[in-house]
Amino acid sequence: MSISVTAANLMIDASGGAARGVAAAVGGNRGTYDGRVTDAETTPRTGKRVLLAKPRGYCAGVDRAVQTVEEALKLYGAPIYVRKQIVHNKHVVQTLEAKGAIFVEENEEVPEGATVIFSAHGVAPEVYEQARTRSLKAIDATCPLVTKVHQEARRFAAEDYDILLIGHEGHEEVVGTAGEAPAHIQLVDGPDGVDKVTVRDPNKVVWLSQTTLSVDETLETVARLKQRLPLLQSPPSDDICYATSNRQHVVKEIAPDCDVVIVVGSRNSSNSVRLVEVALDAGARAGHLVDFAHEIDDAWLEGARTVGLTSGASVPDELVQQVLAHLAERGFADVEEVTTANERLTFSLPQELKRDLKAAAARG
Ligand code: SF4
C-alpha cells in the first residue's frame, strides 16, 4: 500500500496489505446536512447556523481498534485486558469498560495467561517481550499507519541513520516508535525543539513524525531543521496520517466563517487538540474542545451566528449528533455540511484475532 498525503491533497492506493478502500479529495462541497436532528419544516428560522465538517470522527485505525476489543469480548468473554486507553476518547473507554474490558497501564497488571490488547497508538518491542514472558495472549490493535512509522524507524536505524522524530514528548505513540531504536532516535517536540538537536553525521539524518500532529506546524519544524541540516532526508511517505490531515483541512475550510468552532474530543487526544489550534489559526474567533454536549457553555454561543462543528479521529458520531441536538435547542437548527474529502479506507482486524474468529466459526 502506498500513501501520500499533503494538507490539500490526498491519494491512497490501497491495492495491497490490510487496507481496503479509497479516499478521494473533493473541493469543499457544501450542502444541507441530511442527518438532521430537527424538523426543518417546523423549526423557526433564526439566521443561526452550524457548519458541520466532513470528514470528522472515527478513522480507519480507531474503528479497527474498537472493533478488536468488541470482537475479543464476544469471542473470549469478559474480562479482556487492554493496555492503555484503546483510543484516546473518554466515552469509548467507558462504553468498553461497561462491556467487560479492563484498562491497565502496564502488562504487569494483567494476570498471567490472560488476553491483553495493545492500543491503536502502538507499543515498543519490549512490551511484546514482557507479554511473552508473562505468557499473555497479546492482540495488537496498533493502527497499520503507526506500524508503517515503526517500520521506517527500524529500517533507518539498521542503516545507521540519526532519526529525528517530530512528536509530543510522552505521547504513547512517540514512546512506542522511539522504543524501536532508542539509540538512533531523538525527539523534536515542535519548532522550538530544533535548536537542541545534535547529530553524528549531517549527511545521514532523516526525520519521521507522530501521525497526529498539526500539518502546518510540522512543515515549520521541518523547514527549521533543514536550515540547520540541509541534507536532512524526508520519510518515504508522509507520516501524518490521512485522517489527521483531512480533519485539519476541512476545519481550515470552515473556520474563517465561524464565530466559534466546537471540537468534540478528549483532552488527551492529540488530533482533537490540534483541531482546536488549527481552527483558531485559520480564523475562527473562538475554539473549544468538549467530550460531551453538556460541557458547552451557553456563553460561548452568545452573539454567535455561525458555529463550526467537528470531532477528532477517536470520536463516535453519536457524540456529534448530541451536540447538534444541543445546538438546535439554542437556535442553531440550520446545519450545512462542508465536505472536503470522502474517506472509505478500512483496515482488517489483527491477524491473531482473525485466526481465532475463523477457528471458532469452523467449530460452529
Ligand atoms: S488517527 Fe491516523 S494513525 Fe491514528 S489510528 Fe487513526 S488512521 Fe491510524
Image: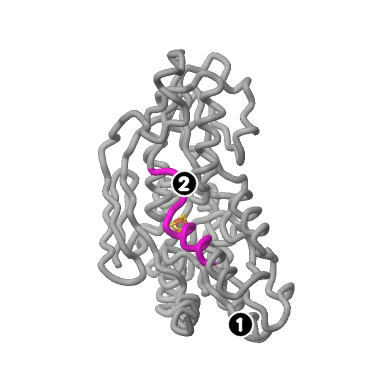
Mark 2 vs mark 1: which is more N-terminal?
2
In front of the other: 136 or 145 = 136
| Magenta-span inclusion, residue 127 | no
User: Mark 2 or mark 1: which is in front?
Assistant: 2
In front of the other: 302 or 204 = 302
On the image, which quarter does residue 113 sit in?
Answer: bottom right
In front of the other: 197 or 240 = 240
Determine whether, in the image, residue 305 is placed left or right of residue 85. Answer: left
Q: Which residue is mark 2?
A: 57
Residue in the picture at 42% in, 46% down = 220
Determine whether, in the image, residue 80 is placed left or right of residue 150. Answer: right
Q: Position of residue 117 (x, y in %)?
A: 59, 71
275 in relation to 104, above or below: above
Q: Are marks 2 and 1 in contact (CB under 8 Å)?
A: no
Q: Which three-letter amino acid code belongs to the residue tagged 1?
A: Glu
The overriding secondary structure of the stretch rendered in magenta is helix
- How many marks overall? 2
Q: Which three-letter amino acid code belongs to the residue tagged 2?
A: Gly
Image: magenta residue range:
55-68
269 in relation to 337, above or below: below
Q: Which residue is mark 1?
A: 129
